[in-house]
Amino acid sequence: MDIFSIAEQDRIVQAISVAEGKTSGEIRLVVERKLKHKAAIEAAVKYFRKLDMHKTILKNGVLIYIAVDDHEFAIIGDTAIHDRVGEDFWGATQEEMVSFFRQDMLVDGLIAGIQQIGEQLQYFFPRKADDINELPDDIYYGEN
């Protein structure tokens, strides 16, 4: 997909790697051009399961879904992280990301969201010596 340049992809993947380097949590980014569901949250739930994020040991995976052309996105977290941060955190993270998106700074917005998510994951699920990276850090490009 030609949504991000190689340099932009590298920046995003690096942000995910840095965030995950401080936590046992897992962060995934799913990118599509167009929304195939009624709402971005529905797409996020679909990909959360498709990418086996519900199978992480500590139930602390977070997925960011974005449909670029439709200007829609959603963030969802597995039960263990959601129970700790609550709805306010997800809304605040989305607002931070939107502040960049409105300035046509898609990559910076995604990175800001990844960093905020990483900080919360680090706080509640700090990395331990025996932690393993359960899921890839790359960008997952959806069905279109």
Image (cartoon, rainbow, N blue to C red):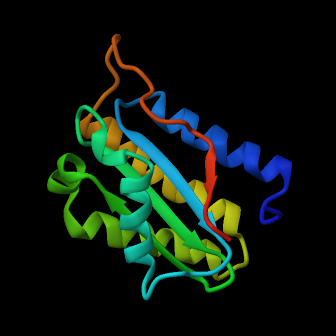
In the rendered image, the quadrant that contains the N terminus is: bottom right
Q: Going 25% across and 31% down the picture, which residue do you hit? A: 57
Residue that appears at 25% across and 69% down: 88
Left or right of 60: which side holds 95? Answer: right
Q: Position of residue 67 (x, y in %)?
A: 60, 75
In which quarter of the view is residue 76 placed? Answer: bottom left
- Please determine whether, in this image, residue 4 is positioned above or below residue 40: above
Query: Closer to the camera, 128 or 123?
Result: 128
Q: Residue 79: x, y in percent?
A: 19, 52
Q: Is residue 141 left or right of residue 133?
A: right
Can residue 120 be seen here? no
Q: Is residue 102 visible?
A: yes
Q: Residue at x 63, y 69 (%)?
A: 32
Looking at the image, which residue sits at the far left? 83
136 in relation to 39, above or below: above
Residue located 42% across and 67% down the image: 44
The spot of residue 36 in percent (x, y) is: 54, 81
Q: Position of residue 43 (x, y in %)?
A: 44, 72
Q: Nearer the viewer, residue 14 or 61?
A: 61
